[in-house]
Image (spheres, grey):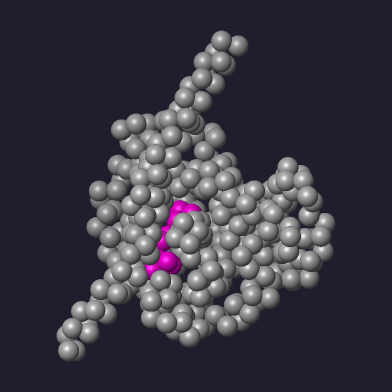
Amino acid sequence: MIVAAGGDALLLAELGAVILACGLLARLAGHLSLSPIPFYLLVGLLINQSGPLHVDAGRDFIEPAAAIGVVLLLFTLGLEYTPTELTVGLRTNGLGGLFDLVANATPGYLFGVLLGLDAPQSLALAGVTYISSSGIIAKLLGDLGRTGNRETPVVLSILVIEDLVMAFYLPLLAGLLAGGSAGSIVASVSLAVAAVVVVLLGTVRVGPTLSRLVFTRSPEVLLLTVLGLTLLVAGAAEALQVSAAVGAFLVGIALSGEAAERAEPLLMPLRDVFAAAFFLLFALEIDLGAIPDAIGPALSLAVLTAVTKVATGWWSARRAGIATRGRWRAGTTLIARGEFSIVIAGLAVLADPDSEIGAIAASYVLVLALVGPLATRFSDELVARFSRRRQVAVA
């Protein structure tokens, strides 16, 4: 009992110190009108295994909390939209999703070939550069008060398309990395396709009924019911090799009316706490010792694919009839990479521990996880400054 109590004391003290540091830095971020995401990443790097303030005891809490954080981020984002808006967005932005895939996966694959990686490893690097971070972007949109902006549905539809592509890509990549047979790979991808179709159709059809069943005037019961349902669906989606983020987003889409209105303010504080854990865990996973050798290639790839992501958002928003500032906001919002990129790199490293893709991916994601939120925060100011200079030059 004495040992257990001592262990508990250490766990509580370390968690308390980490959470307090996040809170203080989040307050600083608020004073600077910045997203707290880069500050959470900084805390994670400081308590990293190879960081100056290594923390061990809180790891067992942070890992599951991080998974819940991503789920809640996407669920609360889904509450902002209806099934009709989702399906219309997917139809109208299908070309934007295709542009996104070609423009952002191709540089990663070609870069892998130039580095001497084999085809499956190069395909993994293509996935790392392709997919934006739903978790970071969802938090960013909320922090900057942009969930109601005209360009936000364009951004969300691209994120949903990316997550749906992941449902097909991940089983394909896992099979190729493992050297599986063509039959087993086809079977795995077919299962993912069927699961995605069922989830999408079910969301549109049962949404109103689900909202009526979930709704209650008791805040406690409503919170527990919605939270439990969201985690259950996210877990089922993950088990079917569909993104847990997609599952959570679709639950948020399905809830409507008074159920959604009452659930949102109850879940927001939980979302923010668990989201901080996600960003901490991401930074904890980075091997700081491998970063110096990987930073050169990672920076080159980061610059190139930051430009291609901005081009993706700008072009897609332009097709939707959105003004210039909204186009730049959409483009810069998509820059951040995060959770899925790390998952993909992890699969590649598991298949070949000597591959350099792990260090490159970690450095690449760290750079864009920091640059993305900052570029989004200052996009309006940069566009306004550029417009003024252009007017002066013309005059």
The percent position of residue 12, horizontal first and vertical second, equals: 51, 25
**Is residue 32 or residue 104 the one in the foreground?**
32
Q: Is residue 384 one of those drawn in magenta? A: no
In the figure, 2 relative to 7: above or below?
A: above
In the image, residue 302 above or below residue 325: above
23 or 374, nearer to the observer:
23
- Above/below status of 372 relative to 269: below
Snapshot quadrant of residue 382:
bottom left
Residue drawn 28% across the image and 60% down it:
299
Q: Position of residue 293 (x, y in %)?
A: 25, 50
Residue depicted at x 43% and y 30%: 17
| Residue 18 as seen in the image, left or right of residue 158 | left
- x and y percent of residue 31 in the render? 35, 49
Residue at point 42%, 76% (across, down): 326
Between 56 and 126, the one lying in front of the other is 56
| In magenta stretch: residue 338 | yes
At a point 61% along the width and 81% down the height, the residue shown is: 91
Residue 164 visible at all: yes
Magenta part of the protein: which range?
332-342
